[in-house]
Structures are given as C-alpha cells and as structure tokens.
Amino acid sequence: MAIQIKDLDQIKVMRRAGLVVAEIHQLIREAIKPGMTTSALDAISAAHIKRSGATSNFFNYHGFPATICVSINDEIVHGIPGPKIINEGDVVSIDCGAIVDGWHGDAAFSVGIGKVDPEDQKLMDTCEESMWVGIAAGKNGVKLSDIGYAIEQYINSQGKYGILQEYGGHGIGTEMHQEPHVLNFGKAGNGPEIIPGMALAIEPMITRGTHKTKVLSDEWTVISNDKSRGAHFEHTYVICPDGKPFVLTALDGGRAELARFGVEISDLLA
C-alpha cells in the first residue's frame, strides 16, 4: 500500500485530532495518582473525546474495549483499562488517539507515580528523549530508516535497554495505522524518502531488561519476558508543505523540544 500524502487542509484537520489527544494527555497527567483504577483514566479520556466532538480510534479497534491503553510496570503496551489499582512507584504508560472528520491523531507517554526508582525515571527519560531524537532526525529529504537509526543510537548511548523489535511507529492519516512501518532500530539510509505531506507516529518502546515480549491471555497486553519495567512514548508529526516538521499531538507543535536540536517547526499551522 502506498504512503498517504496529505495536503495542508488535511494536515490542519489532523492537527485538530492531535490537539484532542494532547489535551487528554494533559488531563490524565493532572489526574493520575495512587489509588486510582485504570478504568477511571479511561473515563477521563472518553469524556474529553465526547466533549470535543471527536471519536475514539482505539475503542472497538479489532475489538479493543476502551479509549486508551494503560500499561503498568512490566506491561509495555496495549494494557486494557479495568479495576487494576495504580500504586506509588508504578511506571504507567498511557496511549490514546482520536479521530476528527475522518483524520487520526495518536500519542503516548509514560509517567512515574509519586516517588519512583531513579532507574525507572532514567528509563522514561531515555525513551522520551529518543522519541524527540527520532522526530528531529526525520527531516524532509532523509530516508525513513534514519529515524530508527537515530533512536537506537541514542538509547544505546544511555545504558543497556531492550528495544522492542516487533512493535514500532507507523504512518497515520485516514487510518490510525498506515504504511510505512517505522522501526526503532536499524541502519541509516534505507527506505522511502521523507517528503512534505508525510505523517508519521514515532513511538519507541524500551525496557530495563530484555527486548523480548509476550502477549497475555487477554490477547492485548504486551509484557516483557523477564518482567523488567518498560516505557513508551509517541507523537504524531508531519512534514508540512514548506518542508518543515510540525508535531500534531504536542500542544506547542513541538517547538520547544525540537529547538534543542536546531529544528524549526512550520508556521503553517499557527
């Protein structure tokens, strides 16, 4: 399947979807605390999606029963919200998305609850920074694999972490998951050229131990084989018609974070 290329008007609708996701992230960050159930976080997301006039791209996706994924500690991705209680010291990963007028947004973050192990905090910091490194590397005119190469090099520079192999980023647009698949590792200089109109979800997933995973009996929740804790970060970004990037799921479009790499974001969505 060909990579979907968006025009500016379509990108503007994707930005609206991305802002709904960014707002959900903000609401969950403000609300999450020890003693909460994971289903309470899903209720926050569902209410904001409804309030925004958007729809959920997670709910009923291949039968998934909620509007967010909540994955705790050794659960890396795709955890199903329910009665599970969030505890002090947990590493909690939240993944959510929204659709506005047929166009998708998708983003994820990990957060430590209360006082966390410094090594868990470093895990999250490394994963988040690798995402920004990948977005900064994914400039107009480079090859797709330059993103995964940059992510892997950064993660490996920070310590011994397991980089998930079976899961990665993806194209996004009128569907949540489109071509191309974006690896979080590999050699530079391969794959299609990144061009204006291309939208990608960049999402590194790492653990403090092995990269090997298994899926639980619920057929969704992905855990590390050695029970090591994991982190997951994701943003949707696009190359605008002016050749500059814009992070559709960041409240500021990624301006502050990408400026650290000397990358200017597009003003076309301001």
Image (spheres, helix red, strand yellow):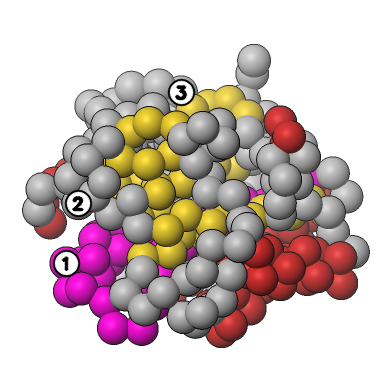
Q: Is residue 238 left or right of residue 159?
A: right
Q: Quadrant of residue 114?
A: bottom left
Q: Which residues are magenta?
A: 103-130
Q: Earlier in the sequence, mark 1 or mark 3?
A: 1
**Residue 122 seen by the camera:** yes
Callout 1: 10 Å neighbours few (<14), some, many (20+)? few
The disc labelled 3 sits on which kind of residue? Answer: Pro
The disc labelled 1 sits on which kind of residue? Answer: Glu
Depth order, front residue of 111/8:
111
- In percent of width and height, residue 259 lies at 37, 70
Q: Is residue 23 left or right of residue 156?
A: right
Asked which secondary structure carries label 3, the reply is loop
Estimate the spatial distance between the alpha carbons at disc 1 and disc 3, rounded to whole Å: 36 Å
Q: Residue at x 59, y 42 (%)?
A: 199
Depth order, front residue of 128/265:
128
Estimate the spatial distance between the alpha carbons at disc 3 and disc 2, rounded to whole Å: 32 Å
Q: Earlier in the sequence, mark 1 or mark 2?
A: 1
**Residue 57 seen by the camera:** no
The residue pinned by badge 1 equals 119
The residue pinned by badge 3 equals 192
The residue pinned by badge 2 equals 208
Q: Earlier in the sequence, mark 3 or mark 2?
A: 3
Compared to residue 124, the image places residue 228 above or below, namely: above
Quadrant for the N terminus in the image: top right
- Of circles 3 and 2, the one toward us is 2
Circle 1/circle 2 CB separation < 8 Å = yes
Q: Which mark is residue 10?
A: none
